[in-house]
Amino acid sequence: MSQQFWTRTQDRIAELVIESPPVNALDSVGWRELARCIDTLQADPELRVIVIRAEGRGFCAGVDIKELQRHPERITEVNAGNWDTFRAIHRGLKPVIAAAHGYVLGGGIGVCGSSDIVLCSEDATFGVPEVDRGALGAGAHLQRMFPLQKVRHMYFTGEPIDAAEAWRLGAIEKVVPTAALRDEAMAIAAKIAAKSGTMIRLAKESLNGIEDGDLEQKYRWEQGFTAQAYMTAESQETRDAFVQKRAVDFSQNEG
C-alpha cells in the first residue's frame, strides 16, 4: 500500500484513509496509486460501499505543489492521476462516502465532488485556490456540489466556505463534531452495506445515467486549460511564490 494512504475492510465496508503529512497533498505517484486502489476496491465482490476519510490536519490539500514547482512537466501525469481517481469514485458501481475534516482543497474537492454522499466535521472548509496556484481544475466537481454562481465566486476569489454554509447550500449530508465524523460515516456505510449489493449497483449506475452532463468529460475539458496555464510565466511565478512563502509578483510577466 502507498505511504500516502491506507485501507482496511470490515463488514463489507472498505475504509480508505489518506495520510500524507503535512497537508495530505498527494504527488503524481500517489494519485495514480490512489486510482488503482479505488478500482481494486470497486472490483472486490465482497465489498458493498467505500468510505474515504483522512488523518491529520485536513482532508486533502490536492496535488503536491512543491513537486510541480520542481517538475512542471509532471502536470500531465498529475492530471491523469486526478482524472483516474475521480473517475474510479464516480463511475465505480459501489457507493462512495467522503468524510471530510479541516481543509478540503483542489483534489480534495474532486474526491468529494465525485462521491455519492459527503459529510464533514464542523471545522471543515471547502475551497479551490487553483487560480492562485497557477492551475485550473475541480470546477466540474465543485459544481456537482454547489450552485453555479457560488462556484464562480469561490473560483475567481479563491475564498473558501465553511461547513455550515456548505450544508445550507445542500452539498453536505450532515455536519458533525470532528470526533464523531468517522463513526457517522461508518454508520451510513453500514446501512448501505446491509442492502442488496445487486440493487445498490443498479441504483448507482442508473443515477449516474440521469445526471446532467458527463462529469469526466467536463473535467477533461478543464484539464486542457490547466496544461495551457502551466505553459505561462504567471503560472510558474505563482508556484514559486507559494513554495518560497512570498507575495506573487506579476510585474515582469503581466498578461
Image (cartoon, helix red, strand yellow):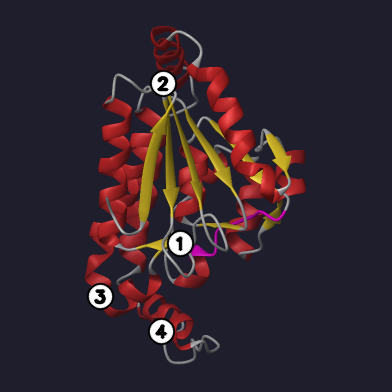
Which residue corresponds to the image point at 38% horizontal and 8% vertical from the top-left? 198
Which mark is first along the chain, 3 or 4?
3
* Magenta region, residue range: 123-130
Please tell me which residue lies in front, 145 or 203: 203
Cβ–Cβ under 8 Å for marks 4 and 2? no
Q: Is residue 33 above or below residue 160?
A: above
**Disc 2/disc 3 C-alpha distance (Å):** 39 Å
Sequence-wise first label, 1 or 3: 1
**Residue 255 seen by the camera:** no
Amino acid type, mark 4: Asp
Tell whether label 3 touches label 4 (CB within 8 Å). no
Looking at the image, is mark 4 or mark 2 earlier in the sequence?
Answer: 2
Residue at the spot of label 3: 71
- Where 181 falls versus 104 (above or below)? above
Q: CA separation, marks 4 and 3?
A: 12 Å
Q: Amino acid at mark 1?
A: Asn
In this rendering, the answer to whether 214 lies above or below 154 is: above
Q: Is 125 a magenta residue?
A: yes
Of labels 1 and 2, earlier in sequence is: 1
State the residue position of label 2: 48
For label 4, the residue is 240
**Residue 154: percent from the left, percent from the top?**
63, 56
Q: Is residue 207 in view from this perspective? A: yes
